[in-house]
Image (tube, helix red, strand yellow):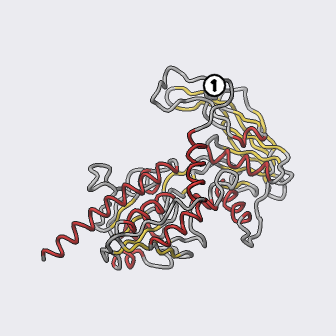
Amino acid sequence: INKVPVSIKAIERTIIDKGFEEGWVKPRLPHVLTRKTVAVVGSGPSGLAAAQQLCRAGHTVTVYEKNDKVGGLLRYGIPDFKLEKNVIDRRIKQMQVEGVTFKTNVNVGKDIPAKELVETHDAVVLAGGSEKPRDIAIPGRDLKGIHFAMEFLSQQNKINAGDKIEQSITASGKNVVVIGGGDTGSDCVGTSNRQGAKSVTQIEVMPKPPVDRPESSPWPYWPMILRTSTSHEEGAERKWSINTTSFSGNENGEVVKLNCVEVRFENGKFVNIPGTEFELAADLVLIAAGFVHPEPTGLLAELVDLGMQLDARGNVKADFGDADFAHHTSLQKVFACGDMRRGQSLVVWAIAEGRKCASAVHNFLSEQAVEENAA
């Protein structure tokens, strides 16, 4: 056996695709309706997972989404070449048959007061994700041509979907520099190549990981090794241990280059190495440095005014303990899950969070029903 092995992901994808094609995956309608109402704010992976489990438990579930289509990060943040959107659509159709109601173009905290949502539902699940991007506060940041990764990726996904929007950000014919070496940065690389970029360079402040698994991360720990995505294989120069000190522009206020320096890690922080300064030509800079916490305005600000607590990182503070109480915020009827509670993470974690949160909400509503019947 000397060929590339078939991945678990490929096997699972084939099974579920075949299941939908053959009609084996069917809607699961609730056996009994509880007449309890739940509002789920956000239709990303955690929100969809929570909504489906709660609906199947017999609760009346409404999902509120601020965009014009359901899917959140799955639809607008992940490129089509990594996630075909029919995968989302088939799940949404299943959920609609099961009884979930979706309300799009509704920004809770703007179109509907958060207080009203809490007062008119028996429980509220916050699944709005971690949308506040980590910025780079250096000279020249305000130059034209410097954008957050999600501005770039969401625009392309909308264009692919046939939405009539103006393409204000394009990599076509440009020297593109992506700041950030994670999955989002990789998605920017792949999208830039597909748009016909002249060149694509991805820089990362962390050192280059080893090709082989180091002794410091033995199984079952996550292996800290070099990962090369299909986007990288399509073409990109990758640089590690690089810090951007400033951006330079032309007379029109447009970015033309990054001023960079190599770094090393000393005493718990990155230190610039003297004499290693260099420049990178750039017509388009995409910042993919991660996300820090949910947007602190609108919905979150209103709920904080009502007494909901945030943690030290700006995420919604919710229990991590016993399953019966996990995901519960400091407001009686309000729960939180996914990136909004734990911070930026993977889609698989968001789905797991949504399912666990649904269980906690169901336990809460069941206790409420017992108390009401006993009264």
Residue type at mark 1 is Val
Q: Nearer the viewer, residue 4 or 264?
A: 4
Residue at the outermost left position = 375
Q: Quadrant of the C terminus?
A: bottom left
- 136 relative to 39, above or below: above
Count of number-bearing discs = 1
- Residue 78 lies, in percent from the top left, at 63, 54
Name the residue rendered at 46%, 58% in the picture.
Answer: 46
- Residue 327 lies, in percent from the top left, at 34, 56
- Residue 298 lies, in percent from the top left, at 48, 70
Q: Nearer the viewer, residue 1 or 227?
A: 1
Name the residue rendered at 75%, 45% in the picture.
Answer: 177
- 209 relative to 179, above or below: above
Q: Quadrant of the N terminus?
A: top right
Q: Is residue 13 left or right of residue 255?
A: left
Q: Is residue 276 left or right of residue 373?
A: right
Q: Nearer the viewer, residue 54 or 218?
A: 54
- Circle 1 residue: 211
Q: Nearer the viewer, residue 220 or 297?
A: 220
How busy is the neighbourhood of tag 1: few (under 14 within 10 Å), some, or many (20 plus)?
few
- Residue 190 lies, in percent from the top left, at 73, 47
Name the residue rendered at 56%, 28% in the picture.
Answer: 265
Q: What is the secondary structure assignment of the residue under circle 1?
A: loop
Residue at the outermost top position = 215
Name the residue rendered at 51%, 65% in the picture.
Answer: 43
